[in-house]
Image: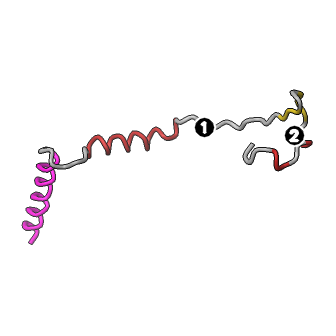
């Protein structure tokens, strides 16, 4: 029983290698897996958004943003 299972697994792996190596498979699994792994590992290196300080102006003069009505302020300052 164990020998038959080993042969089935080996035949499946051989068939998968033949299909991917012969060009019948529409996806390049190795490059896709490598790209995914690289993105997964490098996601922490991406630039983080820095909090921006909101400056409000009226007629070209800087004013206190507390004087501006809330509906005129951006949703996420």
- Tell me the residue at 63%/38% (across/down): 49
Q: Quadrant of the C terminus?
A: top right
In the rendered structure, are the residues bearing label 1 and label 2 in contact, judged by CB atoms less than 8 Å apart?
A: no
Residue depicted at x 36% and y 40%: 35
Please state the horizontal and vertical placement of residue 8, each as a whole percent of the image: 10, 63
Q: What coloring was used for the rendering?
A: secondary structure
Along the horizontal axis of the image, is 19 left or right of 63?
left
Viewport quadrant of the N terminus: bottom left
In the image, 68 versus 16, the foreground residue is: 68
Judged left or right of residue 18, residue 35 is right
Q: Which residue is mark 2?
A: 65
Residue 26 percent location from the top left of the image: 22, 48
The residue tagged 1 is: 48
Q: Quick one: label 1 or label 2, which is nearer the N terminus?
A: 1
User: Of helix, strand and loop, which mostly describes the magenta segment?
Assistant: helix
Q: Callout 1: few (<14), some (14-19), or many (20+) C-alpha neighbours within 10 Å?
A: few
Q: Secondary structure at mark 1?
A: loop
């Amino acid at each position: 029983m164990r020998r038959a299972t080993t042969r089935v697994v080996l035949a499946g792996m051989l068939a998968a290698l033949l299909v991917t190596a012969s060009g019948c498979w529409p996806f390049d699994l190795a490059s896709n897996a490598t790209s995914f792994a690289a993105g997964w590992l490098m996601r922490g290196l991406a630039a983080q958004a820095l909090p921006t300080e909101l400056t409000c102006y009226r007629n070209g003069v800087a004013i206190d943003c507390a004087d501006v009505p809330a509906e005129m302020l951006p949703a996420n300052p």
